[in-house]
Amino acid sequence: MKKPIMTKRATQRRLSLATVAMVIVAAGCAGPPRDACDMTGTPGTVCGFENPEDIEFLARSGVVLVSNLRLGDTAPGGGFLSAMTTAGATGDDQQARPWKVWPREDGSAPAADNNSAIMGSPDCPGPPDPAAFNPHGISSTSSGELALLYVAAHVVEGSGREAVEIFAVVGSDLKTKLSWLGCIPTPDAIQANDLAVSADGTVYASNYQPDNSPMHAIKASLLGTDTGGIIAWKQGAGWSEIEGTTSKLANGVALSKDGKVLYYTETISRSLHRKPLDGSPSVWVDIPGMPDNLSWTERGTLLVASHTSGPRFMACASGRLPCRSPWIIHELDPATMALRPVFEHGGDRLGAVATATPVGDKILLGTVFDDRIGVLSD
């Protein structure tokens, strides 16, 4: 028997019905408000954020930086980057509060002074509009004595630009501030999700979607279509795609300490890949759930956060809050690609965890749709 041919109209209808189904599921998933944040439960919770999707620990500055991704109806308008002392972020100082570092609390969005070396691409049009700034994945590195933060930032409501924004991290502890240094616009308005930066300034970013249409994510979820792979930017050479990384929603990105091996997650295929950059064959491993971001531990392993319920995640994406989408954290041995479960949660205290970032003897948990971060004892 011949397999029936699915026409474009039939495909669109299938997608439309699936979208309606997800909205129906979402409509029944709202729940009562959560209790206030506290450190008595597991995980502990720290409030004061808005969709804290990614977390970066800067040991030299004594702070944790957080991307507050305010996309969609759950939190319309521009997002921001916030900072918190390590004591505040890990719950050791429960009186500490996060503060906005870009744009700042007063709404200002400082750029570096004229004596600072502008970084990034020569075709960067200038500092982003704070009202159109929506930070997603973040990664820190250094250039000499200068600490840098690279941010995958998105368009807001059709304005702004898709780019990797570069900031200087100035000061430390409660005096930490950010100054914009430059940007690297992504080719063809690609939406990057996460990124990693090598010692020589090469930027590796996941091509999560070729543009800001959610249809790519829907088609990848329902039809198994590819969206894009890992793209790399080098000064003087521009962007290129890493061969052999084409994926169904490439997501989290990490780079080995020596810069020779790339790791990335593929959300729809539920897999984590190890890709040597010398052209050697890739290795991959199945990941329980839908894997999101990656973070290195001090012992040289990777933590990967995964979402374990697609329908409940979509319920949160539709704006039904508080988000109670379940999740799990695994630890990966990059040499053997062996996985070890670290912690699994039903989402009642903290939903849709996308990031697990080690800070001392704690693990900080970033969330896609929540107003808080989580804290686990390592």
Image (cartoon, rainbow, N blue to C red):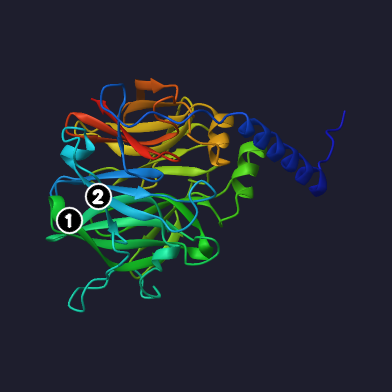
Q: Which mark is residue 163?
A: none
Question: Identity of the amino acid at label 1?
Answer: Thr
Q: Residues within 10 Å of mark 1 (few under 14, many from 20)?
A: some
Q: Secondary structure at mark 1?
A: loop
Q: Which mark is residue 83?
A: 2
Residue 241, horizontal then vertical, whole percent: 46, 55
Quarter location, residue 116: bottom left
Q: Which residue is mark 1?
A: 176
Residue at 62% in and 29% down: 28
Which of these two is toward me, 35 or 221? Answer: 35
Quadrant assignment for the C terminus: top left
Residue at 14% in and 56% down: 175
Which of these two is toward me, 330 or 271? Answer: 330
Residue 100, horizontal then vertical, whole percent: 28, 55
Quadrant assignment for the N terminus: top right
Question: Identity of the amino acid at label 2?
Answer: Ala
Query: Of the residues under marks 2 and 1, which one precedes in the sequence?
Result: 2
Residue at 37% in and 53% down: 204
Q: Residues within 10 Å of mark 2 (few under 14, many from 20)?
A: many
Which of these two is toward me, 319 or 228? Answer: 319
Q: Say above or below: 98 vs 240.
A: above
Residue 35 in view, yes or no: yes
Residue 268 in view, yes or no: no
Q: CA gap, disc 2 to disc 1? A: 8 Å
Residue 205, horizontal then vertical, whole percent: 41, 52
Quarter location, residue 22: top right
Quarter location, residue 126: bottom left
Q: How many marks?
A: 2
Q: Say above or below: 217 vs 27.
A: below
Residue 72, horizontal then vertical, whole percent: 53, 50
Q: Secondary structure at mark 2?
A: strand
Tag 2 and tag 1, C-beta contact below 8 Å = yes
